[in-house]
Amino acid sequence: MSRIIIDDGFRADLVEEATFAGVLEIPTIFKPDEFIIPDGMVPFSCRSRTDGIGKFLVFYEHDLKFNDVITVTDQHLDVFRKFSGIVSPDCSLYRDMPLCLQIANTYMNRAIGHHLQQNGLYVVPNIRWGDERTYTTSVLPEKVAFLGVEKHSIVSIGTYGCVRGEENRHHFRNGLIAMLDELEPEIVLVYGSMPKGIFQELETRTRFVQYPDWITSMKRR
């Protein structure tokens, strides 16, 4: 009699030794012993176009382009080790997604980051928020977008493709302010542009280090 094996997608192997944060139990990416500022940021899909030295590998692109990182993480460890650091996956948090999926993608962001950290990689947590339910306590008892990240650390955010239109800019700025309030990061790496309408009057609250998106950086070369 044949057996049907169902993959529940939980990836329990990623969090066997994790420390969980909050009532939602989001895996924690720990603060590094030192803060490394990369020379540049390289999207996962462009990983073969650079030697990785001095650069961080990032996932600020469509989820389908890094799906294998979620499903077969360890198969990419050798490639990851060519880079000076890696930013945890930018699993999408669309504002029209059900809240349970926004939470699930935050969980996977941290789970992958934790696992890579356990494997000796230098990991910077990617902070991504969706609608106000993820970066306020209007519905949940905690701001889920910031769970699993230690205070006064180094974090990364991506603006590429996320700050077009008034509503997008509104939520991005509000989420950014909430992140600065909650995590008080020492350094914020920014992949993409830094529009004045979003970042104005926030420059004194942390050290922002901006990197052009891959397309823009290639055009400059």
Image (spheres, rainbow, N blue to C red):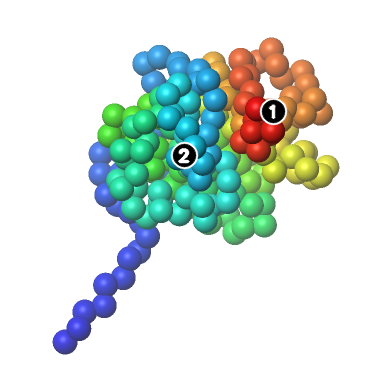
Tell me where residue 80 sits by quadrant.
Answer: top left
Residue 129 placement (x, y as % from top left): 61, 41
- Which mark is on residue 220? 1
Residue found at x 64% / y 33%: 218
Q: Nearer the viewer, residue 103 or 40?
A: 40
Q: Residue furthest left?
A: 1
Amino acid type at circle 2 is: Arg
**Residue closest to the eye, 221 or 181:** 221
Extreme residue toward the bottom, this view: 1
Q: How far across and down, in percent of the image, does residue 59 sit? A: 52, 41
Answer whether residue 58 is visible to the viewer in this image: no
* Residue 198 occupies quadrant: top right
> Helix, strand, or loop for circle 1?
helix
Q: Residues within 10 Å of mark 2 (few under 14, many from 20)?
A: some
Q: Amino acid at mark 1?
A: Arg
| Secondary element at image label 2 | helix
Badge 1: residue crowd in 10 Å (few <14, some 14–19, many ≥20): few
Q: Percent position (x, y) of residue 75?
A: 31, 48
Residue at which label 2 appears: 47
The answer to whether 12 is drawn above or below residue 123 in the figure is below
Can you say which quadrant of the picture contains the N terminus?
bottom left
Per the model, the C-alpha gap separating discs 1 and 2 is 19 Å
Residue at the spot 69% in from the left edge and 28% down from the top edge: 220
Q: Residue at x 34, y 32 (%)?
A: 81
Residue 29 appearing in the image:
yes
Residue drawn at (28%, 34%), measured in percent from left and top?
119
* Quarter occupied by residue 4: bottom left
